[in-house]
Image (spheres, rainbow, N blue to C red):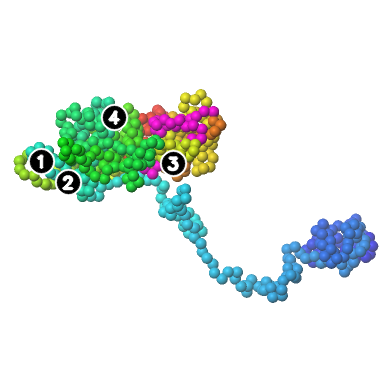
Amino acid sequence: MGFTSMIFLGVLAVQFASYGITTNAFIPGPRSSLPTSPRITSKSLQLIRAYSQKNAQTLSSSDAESSVLNGTPGNVTESSIPLPQPPHKPSSSNKNKNKTPDAANKNALPRSKRPPLRTTRTKRKMELAWCNHGNCQNVIREKVVGEHNHMELTGPATGQVAYSWEQYSMESVVEEEIELGKCKFNVGKNNATSTPAVLILVKREDDELTKVAVEAITELVGYGVQVLVDETLAGELGEYDHVDLESDLIRLFEPRPVPGFGTGEELQQAIEKGGANSAYGIHDVDVCYEEEEEEFVEQPCPADLSDADLIVTLGGDGLLMYASQVFSGPVPPILPVAGGSMGFLTPFQREEMVEAVLISLGLRHVNSETRNEDSSAETCSAMCADSIGAKQTHIVPTKFNSQQSLAFGKNNKICISMRMRLDCRIFNADGSLKSRYNVLNEVVIDRGSSPYLASLECYCDDVHLTTVQADGIIFSTPTGSTAYSMAAGGSVVHPAVPAILVTPICPHVLSFRSMVFPDHVVLRCYVPEDARSTACVYFDGKHRTELHRGDSVQIEMSAHPVPTINRADHSSDWLSSLKRNFNFNTRVRQNPLR
């Protein structure tokens, strides 16, 4: 190594050391302390090259490597050696090279003296909303707390629905017709005080239940309650002499089609008859007229869907589904009385029928616990005076005693289960509406009589869900979760949970399991064009319809639930039915350890 090279490396090492850069080059001392060849890092070599190219001093890579690694200066002189800047402390001169002096001085000011970037600061707050299919609601149970958009719930999503009667008056005007020995209630929708009406539906071809219904009708009429009966029950009541079918408190019930529901022809006819302003397509007056011998004779109009304040089903679960089918629109409270074989949805016994009706209508006080002492409550009775005289109007209050009050309700309120229904529509391949039904239990799409697997394309909110290749698929409500869906392996869901269950029927794959969707989604299944055969759809086991290629079924939550009256509350009735009918999780209890 030459003397000049040694001086160069010494100066270079001093400059690099002053900036914290290690070169592994040493100032020569004793011969034994010198390394065999000086070493320099690749980063330092890059700084040298960059500095040389920047000052337009041509230096080939071979000359630079030979001058540094071999110890010969070559074309590199001491004046061309760069003074590299430390990487953690960039040079302010290079940083402000392309800036004006004012800008450089401004940036060079201390941080405390620099002007603020913003003179004002806007505070934003997060707002939550529920948005379903373009419709957003600001009143929700989620809320934002604090200044950092933390979220919490104001309460549960669902709850026990209950009702009570704050004030109820049965002061009805009674017109005494002494010559006929009958009482006539002047009932009508426009009256200030109208008589409550109860629609009684009885299981057909059951003589024992018919006798129970006759006794109940007789008692309810005696209490001044209006009773609505269908044509079948009215014909059976004619066989009993003590039932006065000519009484104004017994009316014939004739259900009419609800606009917007049914098959294609029924849809159009119901809309044309009912009109756009009528919820049920009913008459606006309470009096009809018949032409008899060139005179108009006043006759009471048959009752329709809007006249019932309460529905009593004396039968099994199928009768409750029939009531749901009749009332496709809004439904009054339903009092289900057991009269069938299983009675999963019927918590009341036939012996309790009359008292339960009076309590449900507010004619008796709600008793959450059974009482042994006598209880009394005021009701209205259409009792006629035996004396003969002119017609007069008066109010007839009476009292009655019961030996034992019915254990009914909770916290002096009557609890009801708002049973969710499914709004189901069938569309043809061209997009036209074919039929529409409200379903209480489930919608089943299966292969029908075809020997091939059902092939369906299913979507959730227009997002592809799955391709069904199975015997079929079940779309169930929480009420229907204990029916066909449970038999197919689906979950058992509390009736108050707002959800739609999707359960496959014998899928030809192991990974297809039952799913639960929230109630705001829209589910749709259609038969693809490449399907081997058609499919069939059923609504609560009825209205079988064949689905051709291109036809689709749309399923969503109905706006009209079915309110059923609970004996205690929805959880107590539901769990009692599970244990009573299905022996839910029943086994011999283990003996304790000794």
Label pair 3/4, CB-CB below 8 angstroms: no
**For the residues marked 4 and 2, what is the alpha-carbon distance in whole angstroms?**
32 Å
Q: Helix, strand, or loop for circle 4?
A: loop
Give the residue at x 44% y 39%.
Answer: 433
Q: In this view, does 75 lie above or below 270?
A: below
Horizontal side of 41 relative to 126 (left or right) equals right
Q: Residues within 10 Å of mark 1 (few under 14, many from 20)?
A: some
The answer to which of marks 3 and 1 sits earlier in the sequence is 1
Residue type highlighted by circle 1 = Glu
Query: Residue 393 location in percent, x, y?
Result: 11, 46
Horizontal side of 4 relative to 543 (left or right) equals right
The answer to which of marks 4 and 1 sits earlier in the sequence is 1
Q: Helix, strand, or loop for circle 2?
A: loop
Magenta stretch bounds? 532-560
The answer to which of marks 3 and 2 sits earlier in the sequence is 2
Horizontal side of 275 relative to 122 (left or right) equals left
Q: Which mark is residue 177?
A: 1
Q: Name the residue under label 2.
A: 172
**For the residues marked 1 and 2, what is the alpha-carbon distance in whole angstroms?**
16 Å
Horizontal side of 346 relative to 592 (left or right) equals left
Give the residue at x 43% y 31%.
Answer: 545
Residue type highlighted by circle 3 = Glu
Query: Residue 106 location in percent, x, y?
Result: 67, 74
**Camera-nearest residue between 481 and 34:** 481
Residue type highlighted by circle 4 = Lys
Magenta-colored stretch includes residue 96: no
**For the residues marked 3 and 4, what is the alpha-carbon distance in whole angstroms?**
30 Å
Q: Extreme front residue here? A: 294
Do we see residue 67 in this rendering?
A: yes
Q: Name the residue under label 4.
A: 203
Do we see residue 347 in this rendering?
A: no
Label pair 3/1, CB-CB below 8 angstroms: no
